[in-house]
Image (cartoon, coloured by chain):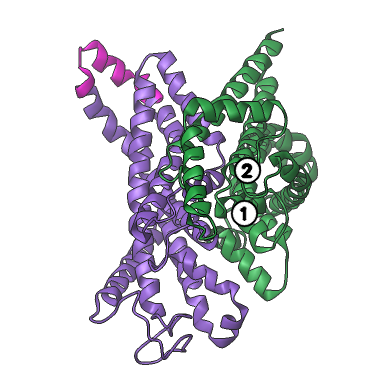
Chain colours: A green, B purple
């Protein structure tokens, strides 16, 4: 009963955060200095009358209440709004790309976790942090994602999944190495090692269960990191996913699309955070 | 702790060299040598020129100074905002504190790159390069504070519940007097946050610039110069195209070394 109330409370908080994110993003967009400017106003093919009509249209739809109600109705009727650039419902643009982006992120996260976990288990077994493991991770984190993707593209080796995997693995490795190094020094593990328990058994029966909640929190962080790497990777490798859609929308000032993609990402991050928090609470109980 | 002084000195050396390059007579990041586009290294242009005939070394030096100054200013603003929100939330009644952390959660739920793109794309079409640079770093500062504020909140809560604080409050110290004691105790927490933010903001600016949403031309920026790597014809012509990315990685490694050692 207590845990059900706790889950409900967490769900309510998550929903509140999602609502605040929608309102916050809308406010941010509305008060951005160029909200009322439209790229079509600079198009020579439009006459003065058409430009005046565009300005009047922008003026009519500039109240916060109007923008919020339009957004809410677009989300409740399932269309997610109307794209300014393509003149089609945003949902039609998002749905086919969602699978591509989801697949790319899933592959990258799974590979990165395998790589980071193996590397950190090997690295943390040593007495001191080894430069052999630390240096590549530090170097990978110092390269901007866009530059890494461009270099891979120019070199003709590696694709979007590899770039995202390397970035995520480097970040995850840093956390996991520190975490495992600390865990290996726990007195009960020192005792178990002294008694001759095999490393495999120690990892499976003692280390992984004891760091499970931190691993879940790290998994949420992996999603956030993957989302921030998504745009440069998809744009540079021409992957027709959500990141490329958002970039196209940003370049063409298609704010309904950009707002919808941002919302989807925010919802994904919030629910992932809720899942990891909920799990650690459940384990604690 | 040995790495930090070396990294700091190297970074300072690079800053001094960049200042000397930018301040040298007749060197301007926007001057075009129309006779020499994509030239290799020469006496006039030690690192060659870009596709528009602009001196690459001057542009790299100016981009370095601009991004470092912008990132430091943004990191300072972020740290100050985080210190304010975190400390106030910790020292105000529990409901207000929770409200402050809810605001942090809302910001943390927003994917920053998408939000940056959203704000940058909503700027007026006639935004000047200097304005675009200011807005880029301002937005970075506005989005960077929540994670830091959470850490400050935890630290400030520990301070609030500490025995010397109880003693101070029981002794009748006023808010201002307590703040005078609390803030120095938060410095060890704020300093690493400030130092971590600097390379993070430089990378964010470079990523945004590489997407064409960062600092506008003709102002030089890391992101703008990374765009050169897209041009395979240019890569075949001169290896100096790799100078910005090599220098950027070196600077980020130095900043990382300084931040880790604090």
Q: Chain of mark 1?
A: A
* Chief secondary structure of the magenta portion: helix
Q: Relative to B5, is A104 on the left or the right?
A: right
Cβ atoms at labels 1 and 2 below 8 Å apart? yes
Q: Quadrant of residue B166?
A: top left
Residue B8: x and y, percent? Answer: 34, 62
Badge 2: chain ID: A
Q: Is residue A155 visible?
A: yes
Residue that appears at 70% across and 23% down: A283
According to the image, label 1 marks what residue? A248
Query: On the same chain: label 1 and label 2?
Result: yes
**Which residue position is annotated with label 2?**
A257
Q: Residue at x 63, y 43 (%)?
A: A257
The picture places residue A6, in percent across and down from the top left corner, at 65, 14
Question: Residue B129, position in %: x, y?
Answer: 37, 60
**Secondary structure category for the residue under label 1:** helix
Choose top left, top right, bottom left or bottom right for residue B26.
bottom left
Highlighted magenta segment, given as a residue range: B157-176
């Amino acid at each position: 009963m207590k845990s059900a109330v706790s889950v409900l409370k967490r769900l309510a908080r998550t929903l509140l955060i999602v609502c605040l994110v929608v309102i916050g993003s809308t406010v941010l967009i509305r008060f951005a200095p160029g909200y009322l400017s439209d790229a079509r106003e600079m198009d020579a093919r439009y006459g003065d009358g058409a430009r005046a009509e565009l300005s009047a249209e922008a003026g009519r739809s500039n109240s916060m209440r109007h923008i919020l109600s339009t957004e809410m109705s677009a989300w409740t009727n399932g269309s997610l709004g109307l794209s300014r650039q393509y003149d089609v419902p945003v949902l039609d643009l998002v749905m086919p790309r969602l699978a591509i982006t989801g697949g790319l992120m899933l592959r990258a996260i799974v590979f990165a976790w395998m790589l980071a976990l193996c590397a950190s288990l090997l690295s943390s077994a040593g007495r001191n942090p080894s430069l052999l493991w630390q240096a590549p991770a530090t170097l990978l984190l110092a390269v901007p994602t866009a530059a890494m993707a461009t270099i891979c593209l120019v070199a003709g080796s590696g694709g979007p999944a590899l770039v995202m995997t390397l970035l995520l693995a480097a970040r995850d490795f840093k956390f996991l190495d520190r975490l495992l190094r600390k865990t290996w020094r726990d007195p009960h593990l020192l005792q178990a090692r002294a008694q001759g328990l095999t490393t495999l058994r120690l990892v499976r029966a003692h280390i992984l269960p004891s760091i499970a909640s931190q691993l879940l929190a790290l998994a949420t962080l992996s999603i956030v990191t993957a989302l921030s790497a998504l745009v440069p990777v998809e744009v540079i490798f021409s992957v027709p996913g959500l990141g490329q859609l958002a970039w196209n929308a940003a370049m063409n000032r298609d704010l309904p699309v950009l707002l919808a993609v941002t919302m989807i990402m925010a919802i994904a991050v919030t629910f992932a955070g809720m899942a990891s928090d909920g799990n650690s609470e459940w384990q604690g109980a | 702790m040995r790495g930090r002084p070396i990294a700091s000195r190297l970074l300072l050396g690079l800053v001094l060299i960049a200042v000397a390059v930018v301040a040298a007579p007749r060197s301007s990041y926007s001057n075009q040598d129309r006779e020499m586009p994509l030239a290799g290294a020469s006496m006039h242009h030690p690192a060659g020129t870009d596709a528009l005939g602009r001196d690459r070394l001057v542009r790299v030096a100016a981009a370095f100074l601009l991004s470092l100054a912008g990132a430091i200013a943004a990191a300072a603003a972020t740290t100050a905002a985080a210190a304010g929100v975190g400390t106030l939330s910790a020292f105000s009644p529990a409901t207000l504190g929770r409200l402050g952390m809810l605001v942090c959660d809302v910001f943390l739920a927003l994917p920053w790159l998408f939000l940056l793109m959203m704000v940058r794309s909503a700027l007026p079409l006639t935004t000047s390069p200097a304005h675009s640079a200011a807005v880029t770093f301002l937005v970075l500062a506005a989005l960077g504070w929540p994670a830091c504020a959470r850490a400050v909140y935890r630290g400030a809560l520990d301070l609030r519940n500490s025995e010397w604080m109880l003693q101070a409050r029981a002794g009748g110290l006023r808010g201002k007097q307590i703040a005078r004691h609390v803030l120095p105790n938060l410095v060890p927490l704020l300093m690493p946050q400030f130092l971590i933010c600097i390379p993070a903001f430089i990378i964010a600016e470079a990523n945004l610039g590489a997407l064409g949403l960062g600092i506008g031309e003709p102002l030089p920026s890391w992101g703008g110069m990374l765009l050169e790597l897209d041009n395979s014809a240019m890569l075949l012509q001169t290896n100096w195209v790799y100078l910005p990315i090599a220098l950027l990685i070196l600077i980020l490694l130095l900043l990382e070394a300084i931040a880790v050692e604090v």
